[in-house]
Image (cartoon, grey):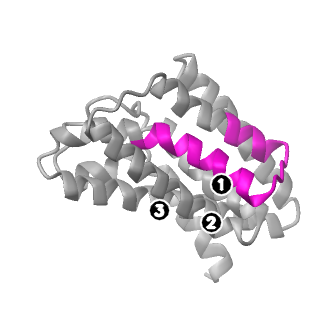
């Protein structure tokens, strides 16, 4: 296998690991690293948004390909801290679903805003994902290990999106990526309306 085939294959592997469970049901309790690591990949709402961030970054090209997947977990960590200390945030589940809808549409319609706008959009949605994780964090047996686990798996899901986004250089690759954005957006609508 060449590096060009390994990255998409690895991306598909990580996406395939995601179970059909909802993102915020009890997966057996927040117990530490493994719970934190598996939480984002066991919820399709998280998978869709995290992959979309990497996919959009790859579609936008450099420097967005690495800035967007850095912005998301950084903002997510601050929002998680706010959730831990009990700062309220309304419409968290709707915000998570909206992240998949909007990011998917941005990819589907090949929207190429200035980098700072893309970073603000990604960061705004990271607030909802981070807050959701943060409100679960205090119950973790080992909160630090849980946090490390969910940040690591978030990064891997972003990497999966980037790897899939590298298809943009292939014939019909941009069309496939835009189609993937449409699927992500439809999945987000499914989350929002309780279909998925």
Magenta stretch in the rendered image? 102-130
Tell whether label 2 touches label 1 (CB within 8 Å).
Answer: yes
Can residue 14 be seen here? The reply is no
Q: Nearer the viewer, residue 38 or 135?
A: 135
Residue at image location 80% in from the left, 48% down from the top = 178
Mark 2 or mark 3: which is in front?
Answer: 2
Task: Determine whether, in the image, residue 95 is placed left or right of residue 117.
Answer: left
- Residue at 16% x, 38% y is 139
Q: Quadrant of the N terminus?
A: bottom right
Q: CA distance from mark 1 to mark 3?
A: 19 Å
Residue at which label 2 appears? 67
Q: Quadrant of residue 132?
A: top left
Image marks 2 and 3: residues in contact by CB distance under 8 Å: no
Q: Is residue 125 magenta?
A: yes
Element type at marker 3?
helix
Q: Earlier in the sequence, mark 2 or mark 3?
A: 2
Q: Is residue 27 above or below residue 74?
A: above
Residue 147, horizontal then vertical, whole percent: 29, 54
Q: Secondary structure at mark 2?
A: helix
Q: Secondary structure at mark 1?
A: helix
Q: Is residue 168 magenta?
A: no
CA distance for labels 1 and 2: 8 Å
Residue found 49% across the figure and 41% down from its top: 127
Q: Main secondary structure of the magenta part?
A: helix
Q: Which residue is mark 3?
A: 156
Q: In the image, which is nearer the foreground, mark 1 or mark 3?
A: 1
Residue 49 located left or right of residue 35: right
Instruction: Please tell me how many numbered marks the rendered image carries.
Output: 3
Residue 150: tell me if it is visible.
yes
Residue at 53% across, 54% down: 72
Badge number at residue 119: 1
């Amino acid at each position: 296998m060449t590096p060009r085939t390994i990255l998409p294959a690895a991306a598909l592997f990580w996406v395939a690991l995601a179970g059909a469970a909802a993102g915020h049901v009890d997966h057996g309790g927040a117990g530490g690293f493994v719970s934190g690591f598996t939480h984002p990949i066991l919820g399709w709402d998280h998978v869709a948004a995290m992959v979309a961030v990497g996919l959009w970054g790859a579609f936008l090209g450099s420097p967005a390909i690495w800035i967007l997947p850095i912005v998301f977990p950084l903002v997510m960590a601050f929002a998680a801290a706010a959730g831990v200390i009990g700062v309220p945030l309304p419409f968290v589940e709707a915000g998570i679903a909206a992240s998949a809808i909007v990011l998917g549409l941005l990819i589907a319609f090949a929207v190429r805003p200035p980098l700072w706008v893309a970073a603000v959009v990604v960061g705004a949605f990271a607030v909802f994902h981070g807050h959701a994780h943060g409100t679960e964090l205090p119950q973790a047996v080992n909160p630090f290990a849980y946090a490390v686990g969910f940040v690591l798996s978030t990064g891997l899901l972003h990497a999966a999106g980037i790897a899939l986004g590298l298809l943009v250089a292939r014939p019909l690759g941009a069309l496939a990526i835009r189609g993937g954005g449409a699927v992500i957006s439809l999945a987000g609508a499914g989350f929002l309306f309780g279909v998925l």
